[in-house]
Image (tube, rainbow, N blue to C red):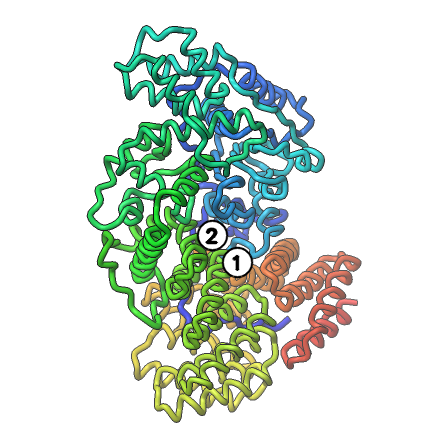
Amino acid sequence: MSDSHHDPAEPGTRSTMSGSASDVVQARDISGGIHFHYGRGTHTAPRQLPRGVRVFVNRQADLGRLDDLLTARREGADGGVVAYVIAGTAGVGKTSLALHWAHRVRDEFPDGQLYVDLRGYDPGVPVTPDQALEGFLLALGVPASAVPNDVAAKSSLYRTILSDRHMLVILDNAGTAAQVRPLIPGMGHSLAIVTSRGSMSGLLIRAPAKRTILGTLSEEESVALLTETTSDYRSGDDPEELAELARLCAHLPLALRIAAERAASRPGMPLGELIADLRDESSLWDALSTGDEEEAEAVRTVFAWSYRALPPAAARLFCLLGLHPGGEFSEAVAAVLSGPGDRVRGPLDVLAGAYLLENRGSGRYGFHDLLRAYAVDRARYEIPQGEQLDAVRRVCAWYLHGAYECALSIAHDTTLLFTVDPPADAPRVRFTGREQAAEWYALEKQNLAGAVQAAADTGQLQLAWRLSIVLERIYATYNHVHDWRETALTGLSAARTLGFREGEAALCESLGRLSRMTLQLDDARRYHRGALDIHRELNDPLSMAKALNGLGWVHLFAHEPKDARSVLEQALTIVRDLDDPYWTATVRYSLGYALCQLGRHDAAEEELTGSLTAFRDMRDRLYESMVLTAFSLLARRRGDAAQALAAADEAVSIARHMDNPLWEGTALLYLGKAQLAAGLPAEALVSTQQAAVTFRREGDPSREAMALDGTGRAYRALDRLPEAVDFHRRAAAVHGMVGDEWKRGKSLLRLGDALTAAGDHDMGELHVTEGLAVLARYDDPRSVELRSEALVIYEDQG
């Protein structure tokens, strides 16, 4: 077989992904299938368990049932149970039980613990399985760009990683079985604990799972919780009054903790007076539903009773915090919501001390979902609508400023339509470097996406589209495609509603880049063409040329070089008329590559020579390296192995000097191909192995698969057929995972060739037939050439 399809990054887009890898491909040692174990080696096992409650009372029977599950698993008598559901009414202590037990047995799960609050009953937007899986995979050491695009593929990868590990997964506050089903480990040693108000019957039917229904505490347990919580502040309370207080709280741990804290904060007040106050408290709202009206009434009453006792500043902050667009927030965000000049440290301490807010450590806080619902309801009554809108505006503007500063610190492309000034009425976000910015983004990731939606929902459309555009720079850097798509669609809708055509075009281009990156090429065409139409309407020729260049690469990704040539020639005419040297060089490179794919070698050389000269004149060494890889490809197509070697070797040297691993890996790919063409398979093996390790470290699965394929070709040339089969099989699998059918078809042809050469004619024929069927969908010259070569080789092998 001849060289594989050239697949550079689109010029004008610098997107090196960050990630980690603990495995390197030691191809000489492979004796079977290739398996990559994300998160092994130097990657730290995830330890995501939040801390449990300070006072945990009894629940011995429930803890015993969980312990029995572990015992059965050790003895192999659990029937393969992979999930344990703790169901029960709101506030009954499901999360407290799960976390208390998880901390107690964490040594049984040495490979780590994963945790996610799915917010299934939160008044805000629940966490989707897609979002939860993305977070888990990243925590497990999967590079961001190796995270698949769809839920099914994410779930499959997640289960594969967990299959040989002992991990505990806490899926807290699940709303439906569909929300958690993709997050349940497959058969193996890992276990998921699911907490939910629902029965999760659908989960039990379709997965090996068990369930317990968590009841309220007994009167004895309730009194013990009250007594232990208040022991440092009160003594001598009448047991009968404690029992009455427990009954008024419906024996629900959440209500009991709030009531106990209220009693502890008033050590000199007789308990009877507190009970009378609670008994007389009327329900102020009816938004809460726990499934049992008596329990619901008790919880509502305790909330109202505790809220009424708050100082005015704490009560107001409690209401405003309910407007926050995410599940967890910092002290700085609380200050933004509260408004200019307000001090929030004291009110936050009051709210956390009253159990109306959870202090989650490191200056961050969160609500129990029932309490957040109560805060939202209280805000309706006590905060004028104008003040509520101002609070949402402040927090969304603060997140916009933070995202902008973050993008400047970590993004590889920071060109935007606008600059973002720090808000005058909020604390400024500052980062001392990339690492600090990355930490901030990791903490605020869900809140940033929530802020886009909150801005759109409250009619603050300019904030919505501006924030979505800034976030695209961060999402593109980390390859966080789910949030990228959702926020860009929200921003696009906002820009269209505003009639802001420039913003609409920018978001169409954003979605076009995302769609091209995820190989959703029909969508990519539609979005790029939409942006092009708007740029024409606005008479913005440079933006038109950029859109045409992007559209050209969509055609190239789709193996439509004739269409690519057409649009790129239009782009070249525009940038030459504008006398823009950078974009002229960029488009000439793109056009030169398209011409090479069409077999127009002389014309390709002319364009590539012009591009290379211009980038050298501009001293853009990185793009010089990029064009040199295309020259290496062109030389191989012409049969000039020496020139191909020289161009690729120079490209590698430049990329190393520029300390750009992604382009070094790309250049190594082309060096390996040139070495194969020159009859140097041993040298090619070294180059392609180095490329594979680089792409794994940088989190680029598509190019990693190209390097694996190149390694397979080197082994085939060395007549080491078992290794060649292994590497081509892995390459085909990864290309299929990322949705690149063309490259999968090419790898299948090479796999079939290696199998046939190894004597397995039936499997060889099967894979060659499948590869030919895949490539038959494409009519470009390169696809035709590959099919012809495969048929000739297969016939020669009999």
Nearest the camera: 766 or 81?
81
Label 2 and label 1: CA atoms lie apart by 9 Å
CB under 8 Å between callouts 2 and 1? yes
Which residue is at 34% across, 56% downward? 393
Nearest the camera: 137 or 111?
137
Nearest the camera: 685 or 356?
356
Residue density around tag 2, few if under 14, some if 14–19, many if 20 or more, within 10 Å: many
The residue tagged 1 is: 701
Nearest the camera: 458 or 64?
458
User: Image check: 70 left or right of 537?
Assistant: right
Q: Of the residues shown, which amino acid type is indicated by label 2? A: Pro
Rendered view: 324 above or below 729: above
Query: Residue 489's x, y, as percent?
Result: 50, 64
Q: Quadrant of the C terminus?
A: bottom right
Q: Of the residues shown, which amino acid type is indicated by label 1? A: Pro
Residue 84: which quarter of the image?
Answer: top right
User: Image check: 66 left or right of 465?
Assistant: right
Res. 143 mark = 2
Q: Secondary structure at mark 1?
A: helix
Rendered view: 693 above or below 291: below
